[in-house]
Image (cartoon, rainbow, N blue to C red):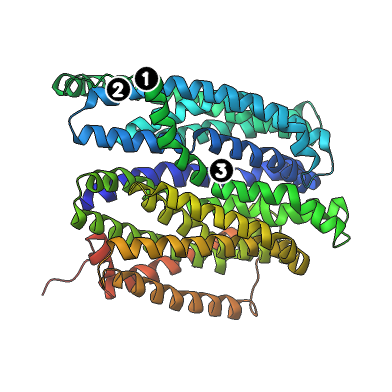
Amino acid sequence: MKNKLLSGAFWMSFGSIFSRVLGIVYLIPWLIMFGKDQNQAQAVFNSAYTPYSLFLALGTAGFPTAIARQVASYNSQNKFRNSIRIFKYGFLFMMMTGVFCGVLLYLAAPFIAAHSSVVSKTAATTAIYYLVPTMIILPPMSFIRGFFQGNQDMKPFGVSQLWEQFVRVLFILGATFVVLEVFHKSYIAAVNFSTFATFVGTIASYIYLLNYARTKMPEYRLLYQESMPVEKQNILILFRNIVSEALPFVLIGSGITITQFFDQVTFKNIVTNLLGATVQQAELMYTYFAANPNKITTVVVSLTIAISETTLPLLARYYDRKDRKKVSEVIGQNIDLMFLILLPAVTLLLALSWEVNGIFFQFDTYAAKLLAMALVSSISLALFTDFFTIVQAMGKHRLAIRYLFVGLILKLVLQIPCVSLWGAFGAIISTMIAFLAISLLAFRRINEDNLLPGQLKNVKKVIFMNVLLFLTAFLVQYLMGFVYIPHTKITAFLYSVIFALLFGVAYVVMLDKTKLSQKILGKTFIMKKKH
């Protein structure tokens, strides 16, 4: 079971993490091409991308997870024919969902742009329009990924994400170069083509998934032949079951994006009306606390998503079988693995916040501090993602939704006082408090119902180890500040690579010395000498 969890986590991580890494690496040449307009370009791009992500989450977030859970459940009962039936009708439903969300996004575009932290409402509205075609065709594609996930086949999920992002990035860079350097158009035109790149990337993902499905047909035919007869259901009842299964996942999957969208439509009004900032200042602050850091923190949260999405089918299967021992075992491994990967990633990026911000964006002390705060907040977002996935995998959907609404209300209540007191930092702090509170609520329920005393002793050791790493890394950075501070992208990159390598070696040695690598991963990194 541990090997299956680690194998699934690898493929989910491979696609999810590397696609997100590509999604931030391209920013270096992309923003360089914009020159002095790069902050404005980022603001317009993000003003379109955040609402698109919200509509996409509302239209897709729960459905791949829902079908993964149902397919896993059916397959465990040798009912593969039911899996195929629910996939067919679910795919049709997702096509209709895509059209509905696309039309809704198009109609809402002017309103969203008017309340976003951008100077030009027209530019933001047009950028949103360019994302509508993707909104229509992406939901059915995500449903295909969910079917593979439910069959414990994580490779197409991960690789299709990477393929989609790779083609998207190539189109963004190529289109931006042609628009700015060949035709000498405005940065707004380049941003519009950059948003349209999501459509091109989605087409590439479709091609890969359909080709992969073709190679799996012999295996699926065999499963279909050996399956029990299909249980006939009324089509409307089938649709209702899909929606009722997916709706909680839709809401929970949209939680983080809802708060980001809330920041987008409220921040400008708060800082201009209460703090006396200009629209230009609001746009710059929004870029520094949301548009830029979100690119980095997304990679951190994706580490958790990769683990939680891998755990879901396994956990659902054992929970359906009422195998409490296996449920407890999977949850324990899940939490161990999450902390083992999440904490050092945040610690390393925190220590290098000045360098990382300079490599991808600009060398700016204020922006680097906001990035550091966003990285701290990403821990609460990662905990929310993982713990709520566990709660839902056990069928406690209403509880998860109640907790989410508590978090959203808390964010709503804290937003104005926090932003009024701490400006851009306040928006991050209000999000962090809200998600940390509901993550603790979810963990308390998980711990009470499923975990055994002492089962998370490895987590305590990982946390203690990362506290030591945190203090050591920041002490080294503080002392290095008296000697050398990089101020160019190349020197910052080289410095970060050396620092990360030393950090990684130290972490691996600590894992082996404390035997945590053997306990959590089932292996050691450093070969022991034979006597």
Could you tell me which residue is drawn at 51 percent across and 43 percent down?
251
Q: Quadrant of residue 153?
A: top left
Q: Is residue 91 visible?
A: yes
Is there a contact, CB below 8 Å, between mark 2 and mark 3?
Answer: no
Mark 3 → mark 1, Cα distance in angstroms: 32 Å
Identity of the amino acid at label 3?
Gly
Query: Can you say which quadrant of the picture contains the C terminus?
Result: bottom left
* Label 3 vs 1, first from the N-terminus: 3
Mark 2 → mark 3, Cα distance in angstroms: 34 Å
Mark 2 nearby-residue class (10 Å; few <14, some 14–19, many ≥20): some
Q: Name the element at disc 1.
A: helix
Q: Quadrant of residue 8?
A: top left
Could you tell me which residue is drawn at 33 percent across and 32 percent down?
148
Q: What's the mark number on residue 23? A: 3
Identity of the amino acid at label 1?
Lys
Locate residue 3, reporting x and y percent. Answer: 22, 50
Compared with 510, 525 (above or below) is: above
Locate residue 451, reporting x and y percent. Answer: 28, 64
Is there a contact, CB below 8 Å, between mark 3 and mark 1?
Answer: no
Q: Name the element at disc 2.
A: helix
Locate residue 431, reporting x and y percent. Answer: 61, 59
Which residue does the numbered mark 1 point to in the structure image?
A: 88
2 or 3: mark nearer the eye: 2
Q: Nearer the viewer, residue 528 or 415?
A: 415
* Label 2 vs 3, first from the N-terminus: 3
Could you tell me which residue is drawn at 61 percent across and 65 percent down?
372
Which residue does the numbered mark 2 point to in the structure image?
A: 84
Q: Name the element at disc 3.
A: helix
